[in-house]
């Protein structure tokens, strides 16, 4: 494993996102002096918090899986997860709504989930589900230990007996045909393959190894942290501070100072210089390279994931038939992915995620009110340049509200008291390449050792962490990426 050369006593972490915080905790546990520099007044990065007239919204991810990956950096400094976070298992993890009017509750208890699938889709489909669970669990265990939770420098690092096992399991086939081996009903096929969008691909194009996302989502369990997802970075930052990590909030880094091929300090907007033996960069990797580091030669062209429009809505309306997380599938399936990914178009028949945090935590809104988070996948700014700064966001938000009203949210528009619309242009303004919060897509050429490395190729004491590097996108992966970045510095074989 390639590691940082030279002294590593003082590490400056730029960005207090989940990956930067996990990295800081692992470094503190290894005895390093760590300074975290964050442009916002609070930790969290994409996992921020928005308050609008008494309504509370998570600004980034809303789905939390694998809390043991939060526990890991805390345990590194001797802390217990339960002392820092109160987690509620969500039951159901999701409620899926289909265009034929049927619904399916996704439950993490396999016996109850098999019964639910049998009720909606028949006993043969329930048998397929139980076989899928066995497959996906083995896939996760194999991938996590041997491919995800490791620093990979070259494709040769993949070559071992476990790669043969992965091949034997069909991990390098396409995801949708693999899912269809277990499920025949279009409803179950969708609920166990839509997660490919998180990896930036259609299920028909993604590799079957990404069935692990469905496993984490739909089998391992979904949780809600008291105080919302922003409570996770608050907990990690609190523990880091307790164990000696220094935080400098409301401080924007404008440049990484380099001398003779090594980073020597970070320079802040106010002209301050913070010396460093090692610099860890948590901002979106292509943007960090472009804005903070000396310009190298030709940059690698990356394929980016789709983006999304998010509506943060505070409302007088409540709906008894929805759950905490709700997926509303349109009639179109393959065509929807083609529109967003291949053609750079808005969905003509949207599939939407609607999260209703007040379903679990009434304190997220004023008394008697509800908060909603509506996510609609859209093209990124490269695949589909659109006039998001010229009023398209408001028009598209109105269209999404009408779609929800047609799908059972009666009076949704009339109930809106506050609304904030986040578009791909806003993601770009927040420092995300191609205007997407989902980073580089997980194509084969951008997966594992082919994904941008977390160790800079020319500056041997600059390390990257976050969704743009290994292992990839999603809360579990960025927490692991923080550990992998720290391992490059502490020289602990991962």
Image (cartoon, helix red, strand yellow):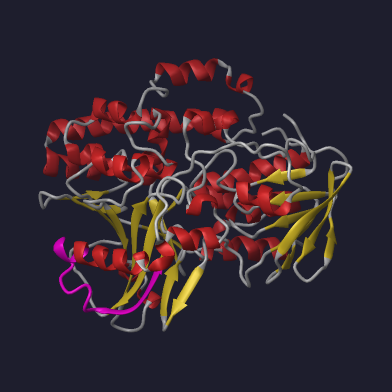
Q: Does 173 appear above or below 307?
A: above
Q: Is residue 410 above or below residue 306?
A: below
Occupied quadrant, residue 387 = bottom left
Q: Quadrant of the C terminus?
A: top right
Q: Which residues are magenta?
A: 404-421
Report the number of discs.
Answer: 0
In this image, 207 relative to 29: left or right? left
Q: Nearer the viewer, residue 366 or 268?
A: 268
Q: Is residue 41 visible?
A: yes
**Magenta stretch: residue 406 in it?**
yes
Q: Is residue 488 left or right of residue 182?
A: right
Figure quadrant of residue 328: bottom left
Asked if residue 431 is positioned above or below residue 143 in the image, the reply reads below
Question: Where's the N terminus, which quadrant?
Answer: top right
Whole-percent x, y for residue 183 in the image: 22, 31
Q: Position of residue 138 (x, y in %)?
A: 42, 28
Residue 145 visible somewhere in the drawing: no
Q: Nearer the viewer, residue 473 or 23?
A: 473
- Whole-percent x and y of residue 219? 35, 42
171 inside magenta stretch? no
* Residue sitting at x 38%, y 62%: 310
Residue at horizontal 21%, vertical 78%? 414
Quarter of the rendering containing residue 172: top left
For residue 9, side relative to residue 13 (left or right): right
Relative image position of residue 486 (x, y in whole percent):
71, 44
């Amino acid at each position: 494993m390639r590691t940082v050369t030279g002294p590593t006593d003082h590490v400056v972490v730029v960005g207090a996102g989940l990956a930067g915080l996990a990295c800081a905790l692992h470094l503190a546990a290894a005895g390093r002096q760590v300074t975290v520099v964050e442009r916002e007044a609070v930790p969290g990065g994409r996992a921020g918090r928005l308050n609008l007239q008494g309504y509370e919204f998570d600004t980034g991810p809303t789905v939390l899986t694998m809390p043991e990956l939060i526990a890991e950096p805390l345990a590194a400094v001797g802390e217990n997860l339960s002392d820092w976070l109160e987690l509620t298992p969500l039951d159901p993890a999701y409620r899926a709504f289909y265009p034929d009017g049927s619904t399916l509750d996704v439950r993490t208890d396999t016996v109850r989930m098999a019964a639910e699938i049998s009720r909606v889709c028949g006993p043969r489909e329930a048998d397929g589900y139980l076989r899928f669970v066995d497959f996906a669990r083995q896939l996760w265990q194999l991938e996590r230990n041997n491919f995800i939770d490791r620093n990979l420098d070259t494709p040769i690092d993949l070559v071992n007996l476990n790669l043969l096992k992965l091949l034997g399991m069909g991990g390098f086939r396409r995801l949708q045909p693999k899912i269809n081996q277990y499920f025949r009903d279009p409803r179950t096929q969708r609920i166990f393959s839509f997660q490919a969008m998180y990896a930036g691909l259609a299920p028909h194009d993604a590799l079957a190894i990404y069935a692990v996302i469905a496993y984490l989502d739909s089998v391992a369990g979904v949780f809600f942290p008291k105080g919302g997802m922003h409570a996770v970075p608050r907990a990690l930052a609190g523990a880091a501070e307790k164990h000696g990590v220094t935080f400098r909030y409301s401080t924007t880094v404008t440049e990484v100072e380099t001398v003779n091929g090594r980073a020597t300090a970070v320079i802040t907007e106010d002209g301050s210089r913070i010396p460093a033996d090692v610099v860890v960069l948590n901002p979106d990797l292509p943007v960090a390279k472009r804005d903070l580091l000396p310009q190298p030669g030709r940059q690698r062209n990356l394929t980016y994931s789709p983006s999304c429009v998010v509506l943060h809505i505070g409302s007088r309306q409540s709906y008894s038939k929805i759950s905490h997380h709700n997926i509303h599938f349109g009639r179109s399936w393959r065509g929807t992915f083609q529109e967003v990914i291949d053609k750079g178009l808005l969905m003509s028949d949207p599939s939407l995620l609607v999260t209703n945090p007040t379903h679990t935590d009434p304190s997220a809104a004023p008394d008697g009110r509800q908060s909603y988070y509506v996510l609609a996948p859209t093209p990124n700014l490269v695949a589909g340049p659109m006039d998001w700064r010229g009023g398209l966001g408001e028009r598209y938000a109105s269209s999404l509200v009408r779609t929800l009203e047609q799908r059972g949210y009666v009076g949704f528009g009339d109930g809106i008291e506050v609304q904030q619309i986040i578009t791909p242009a806003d993601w770009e303004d927040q420092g995300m390449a191609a205007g997407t919060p989902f980073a580089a897509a997980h194509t084969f050429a951008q997966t594992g050792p082919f994904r941008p490395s977390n160790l800079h190729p020319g500056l041997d004491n600059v390390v990257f962490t976050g969704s743009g590097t290994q292992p990839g996108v999603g809360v579990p992966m960025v927490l692991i990426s923080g550990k992998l970045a720290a391992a490059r510095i502490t020289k602990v074989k991962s």
